[in-house]
Image: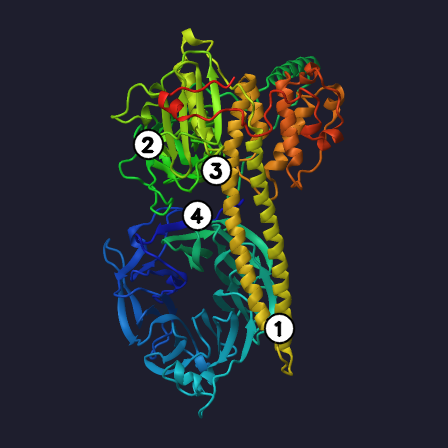
Amino acid sequence: MSLFKARDWWSTYVGEQEEFDQGCLRVADVDNTESDKIIVGSYKGVLRIYAPEPSKPGAALQPEELILEIQLQDPILQVEVGKFVSDTELLHMAVLHPRKLSVYAISGTMGTVGHGNQYQLKLIYEHSLQRTACNFTFGGFGGVKGRDLICIQFMDGMLMFFEQESFAFGRFLPGCLLPGPLEYCSRTDSFITVSSSRQVESYKYQVLAVATDAENKHDSEHQKLGSGKRLMKDWMVNIGEQALDICITSFSQAASSILVLGERNLFCFKENGQLRFMKKLEYNPSCFLPYTSVLQGTINILIGNYNNKLLVYQDVTLKWVAQLPHVPVCVQVGNFQDLKGVVVTLSDSGHLQCSYLGTDPSFFQAPKVESRELNYDDLDSEMKELNKIIREATKTQDILPKAESTDDLKVTVVVSPNLDAVSQAPDNSVDVPVPSISLKVTIWSRLAVQDVKLSVCVQSPLAVTQDQLDFAALEAGTSRSVTLSVFLKESFPPATLGGDIAVSYRTPTERYPEVKPWLIDLNLPLNSDLKNNLLEELSVPRIAQYTFSLPLKLICQPVPPSKNAVHKITIDTNKPPVNISVLFPDFLGESDQEQINVLGFKLLTGSTITLLASKTSSRYRVQCDQFEDLWLITKQLVQRLQETFATEEHKDFVCTFPGPIPLQEYFQLIDQHFEMRLNAEKYKELLSERAVQYRAIQRRLLTHFKDKTPSPLRNLDTLLDGTYRQIIALANAAEENQAKLYQTFIRLKSATQLMVLLIGLWQKLNGDQVTILEAAFLPLTQDSQELGWEECVDAAVVHLLRTCLSRSSKDQALNPTNQLSMPKDTCRLKKHITLLCDRLSKGGRLSLAADAPQHAINMPGFQAIPESDMEERTADHAPLGTFQNLAIVTRKSEPDLSQSAVEENVIPEDR
């Protein structure tokens, strides 16, 4: 935000739903009364003329200030004021339409009584155009005095000249594809434009006048083959970018200059095309205007940009920056009511403002403080009291402030119990039909809040129909509701079925009653705008959050159970078995039996998962051909079991996993993910090599083309084409590998969450310990080449092994600070994960408390192992009994379900 704002002297909004651009604003004495008027023309063809006379700065528009408003038949492209009529030197107004140029006279009649002055628009003459016009310029072409001639540039690059009421001649600019800005330089009698080749070009009027007349571009291209004068440029400069506008200055204290505003640079040329200076801009400019010269040899320039800023430069030196309420597309300077140098700006939507630069002076003087002697005893007692308050505040461990009992804004989310009747998912999102489910988000505000922004976040591959919504404000005690839909966007299952909603808002100053009266009653010479700005700055930004869960049926549907599966997980409980129809009633149809012990789930983009419940023992089994697809069903099973037994009489309910931990299946997914990262690195190196080769071939070809004596290319063009094809193929392969890498990361994330759940059930970890394990194994929400999952998890696991899971004080003292980098392989990570599970099985517990090292575990059969040994040692060299409860290979000892077992819904014992 700028320190200073442009002071609003007079402003209004021109029309409704009208568009404006560069040539739609002019400030001139159009009625020849020695008083500037503001002329505005819109693309809707409405012409308005204002005479601002505010009673005080910032006053609203008065009806008499709009002196003329008329609807013309065609859009207005440009408005100019000059001496366009032959028999008089009075100023007239020229209006350019796409197919017509009209010249008008503005006359005023003094009103009688209280009716005010009356202004009329009279058409003097007009020229019908056979081509579509772009812009025009005017001046004393050929050195004429006392009148202005007109030059119109068309969309096909033709220049058409009019000597006021009569047509003179037309010329095509050579090599013109698109028209650019056009200006006339009276000192050199030449026209300055910027071609589509990004070159500033100058054409003498005499050269244009005597050149061969051409009816079309084809005739212009054949001038060099026929008779007549050829149209030649006076000079040409390549600026390397498109030009937004051109202005030509002729101030008494500075030499005549040609200023060109580019997309990122400001150029200043002499009349002969030599560069005077160039200013690189750190923003995107929208308009500019050189308005005066206050220092010998320098030019003052106004530049507006798309950051709502108005910048004042003296040549290349920035002198002032002012904040505007809009993005200016045109800027002018005028004199109104004896106030000289008023800046007039116009936005593309019609916000017209007259402003001046500067600040409001402050006459406030701080009152003198009465001198009094200091009482050091009182100061000492006050210091002790403050120190006591500081010590009490530092004792608390809370980093964030506690939430208040009454929230200013509450967010609630209601997930529809049924899927949408008509899916809101795009047709091309997934190959199979994808359902969607509706979310109703309600925002209730206790106070009046402002700048309310709603953000909905769901984890990919899930997507929401609209993730960002803005509300201007909410009144006190009101609520706003919006309905959204969530659906599956990619062709692989998600790792979580949750989502988050965040609402950011600003509380008003009424929240702080002791502040606002102090500002209002303070006897300061501040205007109302400044006081309101101070009150607005005192509003506090806040955020309200809400977490919601999506139903399982959004991503899967019931199918007949599968008899055989590769991967199986068994969950034990200490309570009688619960029928599956009670646990998953949302997956039972009307024709299904009320008592069933087996149920099949089919992921929309994955495999089939089978859930079985034993009739004789309190055991449940989840089986599937894909290891990572077991996660969501296993999580739902444990969660629904806990909800079923969440009563006072079942306080001792617990779910356990008998083991062993399926590490081998987990390690296979880690290797797949790491292989994708290695492939991404290989593609990156190959692309870099081919790019270097491509640039080297280009340099060789450029050298051949610059050589004055032609020489054979020696198949360099063929090699260039082949290298280009290789770069395109490698880029496509790298993009495809990146998509596979992301999909593999989501699958690894699902498997990791399953591993954390199984380890927690296996060792009966409490909630804090499971949270520590999740933080170690799930440090990233998304993967990247700079910081990958493998190195982050390895560093976290090593930290746990050296702190809460350490065997001696020597291990606890080790604290490596090596920089994280992509490893060569995953052997070290897999050994550390295996060692973590082994130490947990021997009685180790996870803790981040400050006194954790004092409770270092003393596991039998262990000796202190140096870090170098821990990195190099394999599982095969571990002491006997280390892995007695741990599975390092695929569980072949667990029998598959037979045909009879599926039919009888009984899980065979595998003791």
- Tag 3's secondary structure? loop
Which callout, 4 or 1, points at the residue further toward the start of the chain? 4
For the image, the number of numbered tags is 4
**Numbered badge on residue 702:** 1
The residue labelled by disc 3 is 526
The residue labelled by disc 4 is 325
The residue labelled by disc 2 is 480
For image coordinates 63% across by 63% down, the residue present is 693
Q: Amino acid at mark 4?
A: Pro
Find residue 451 and report its horizontal and vertical position in percent.
41, 36
Q: Amino acid at mark 2?
A: Arg
Which callout, 3 or 2, points at the residue further toward the start of the chain? 2
Which callout, 1 or 3, points at the residue further toward the start of the chain? 3
Mark 2 vs mark 1: in front: 1
Q: Residues within 10 Å of mark 3 (few under 14, many from 20)?
A: some
Q: Nearer the viewer, residue 7 or 695?
A: 695
In this rendering, position of residue 705 left or right of residue 137: right
Is residue 347 among what the camera can see? yes
Disc 4 + disc 1, Cβ < 8 Å = no
Find residue 434 and report its horizontal and vertical position in percent.
34, 40
Q: Residues within 10 Å of mark 2 (few under 14, many from 20)?
A: few
